[in-house]
Amino acid sequence: MDEALSEREREVLCEVVELYLGCGEPVASRSVAEASELSLSPASIRAIMAQLEEKGLLQQPHPSAGRVPSDLGLTVYLERILRQPALPANERERLCRLLPAGGTLEDRLDHASRVLAQLANQVGMAVRPVASAAPMRSLHFVKVDDSQVLAVLVTGGGVVESRVLAVGRCFEDEELGRISRFCTDTFAGLTLKEIRDRLAVIVEQERTRYDELVAAAVELTNMATRKAPISSSSVFVQGVENLLAGGEAHRENLQRVLVTLSERTALMHLLDRFLASTGPYVAVGGELAFLGAPSLGMVIRSFRLGGGEVGLVGVIGVRHMNYPYLVPVVDFVGQRLAGQGGGS
């Protein structure tokens, strides 16, 4: 769409978007004329803004009001920002000081979401890397009680995932130790999908003979490697109170957002969509319809640890966030988390 615009249309669109991001209000042609270096009269600017509205890039909330960028107009503007998400050296140094490398992965994610909330004055969030696409280092089973077993999966990148399995019989500690050694020896280096494929082969091979150890290992491993949704403890959210600063006009939208963030279920479903993306990504308007709040925007980035585990970090807030600043900030935070790895 950017290629279909004349140079003047492109410059006016950028001026309108930048003024809108600064105030969150409709932008008048006179304001654009005063802010731009085009040396055009307000009447000429108004004519160009009308052309941009016809192309679906601007919209007029009220007949007597100025114009605001549409979702498409914001997207066209943001494409330029996303092509060069670089931070000045002094800002990178400041972020390095704000994001210490020590502590557990969970500590770093919680801290990153807090720093992003402070820098953006919006909501900062982070999602703990999931192990589904990462090679496994080891798989252990520990008895909880007669009807429950704890499965502990450790990836090559050091991310630990655990889940409690409901079992149909009592497993003794010694038996679980043998099963753990068998599973680690058999499945080390495989992803969860590859483990499930390997399980199917083992089951087919075992049809001709009965081995109690292998049968128990197949049963427990099958339960341990089933895809599970991101748990609430895997999502770190900070700065929800920042969304309350938008005033009475946004209160209804903010209430829906706060309910969603407090429950986290819908948020986790949305974040799960972006696990496969690379680089920073901006979602506005319709892409955030799940919140019932089209006045919001989101800047998000996936990051990958050394073992292949993928997590997310980002900011969600008002639609007129400072994207030129936040896109490179979120991009840098994601890169730093990837470089720090998953260990403590």
Image (cartoon, rainbow, N blue to C red):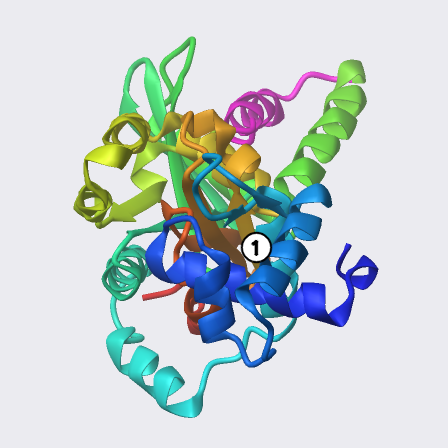
Side of 5 where 112 appears, left or right:
left
Image quarter (top left, top right, bottom left or bottom right) of the N terminus: bottom right
What is the three-letter code of the residue carrying label 1? Tyr
| Residue nearer the viewer, 31 or 261 | 31
* Residue 218 lies in the magenta-colored region: yes
Task: Answer whether residue 156 is visible to the viewer in this image.
Answer: no
Residue 151 falls in image quadrant: top left
Helix, strand or loop status at disc 1: strand
| Residue nearer the viewer, 207 or 20 | 20
Side of 143 where 65 appears, left or right:
right
Q: For the image shown, how many numbered marks are present on the structure?
A: 1
Residue at point 29%, 15% (across, down): 146
> 35 above or below 195?
below
| Residue nearer the viewer, 320 or 269 | 320
Q: In the image, residue 209 lies at what x, y percent?
A: 75, 17
Side of 41 where 102 appears, left or right:
left
* Residue 4 lies in the magenta-colored region: no
Residue at point 49%, 40% (across, down): 271
Q: Which residue is mark 1?
A: 281
Q: What secondary structure is the stretch in magenta mostly built from?
A: helix
Write the start and end of the magenta stretch as one range: 209-228
| Residue nearer the viewer, 260 or 212 | 260
Residue at point 27%, 26% (across, down): 252
Residue 45 falls in image quadrant: bottom right
Image quarter (top left, top right, bottom left or bottom right) of the C terminus: bottom left
Residue at point 58%, 61% (across, down): 43
> 143 above or below 301?
above
Q: Badge 1: few (under 14), some or many (20 or more) residues near its Cα, within 10 Å?
A: some
